[in-house]
């Protein structure tokens, strides 16, 4: 199976959003991060 993941969280002390991703494939992690950024900034 696919063990890739994405985590989006706001900082509790700074006005920033942190985006974390992991995948076995480097290209896939870049796509996941880009999708995470789009999602975070659309809210």
Image (cartoon, helix red, strand yellow):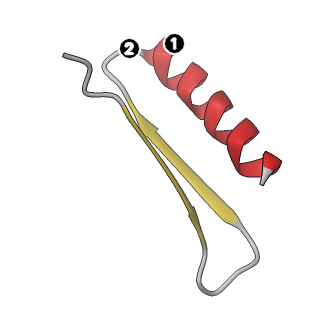
Q: Is residue 42 above or below residue 16?
A: above
- Which residue is the site of mark 1? 27
Q: Secondary structure at mark 2?
A: loop
Query: Could you classify mark 2 by the number of other residues whose Cα lies within 10 Å: few (under 14), some (14-19), or many (20 or more)?
Result: few
Considering the image in quadrants, where does the N terminus appear? top left
Which residue: 60% across, 58% down? 18
Which of the 4 image quadrants contains residue 35?
Answer: top right
- Whether label 1 touches label 2, CB < 8 Å: yes
- Pick out the residue farthest to the front: 43
What number of labels is visible? 2
- Which residue is the site of mark 2? 25
Image position, residue 10 (x, y; %): 61, 69
Which residue: 45% across, 39% down? 21
Image position, residue 2 (x, y; %): 26, 19
- Pick out the residue farthest to the bottom: 13
Q: Is residue 20 above or below residue 3?
A: below
- Of 9 and 29, the residue lying toward us: 9
Q: Secondary structure at mark 1?
A: helix
From the viewer's perspective, is 43 left or right of 32?
right
Query: Could you classify mark 1 by the number of other residues whose Cα lies within 10 Å: few (under 14), some (14-19), or many (20 or more)?
Result: few
- Distance CA(mark 1)–CA(mark 2): 6 Å
Q: Is residue 34 above or below residue 24?
A: below
Which residue: 80% across, 49% down? 41
């Amino acid at each position: 199976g696919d063990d890739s993941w994405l985590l989006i969280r706001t900082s509790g002390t700074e006005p920033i959003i942190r985006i974390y991703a992991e995948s076995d494939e480097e290209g896939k992690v870049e796509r996941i991060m880009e999708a995470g950024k789009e999602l975070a900034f659309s809210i």
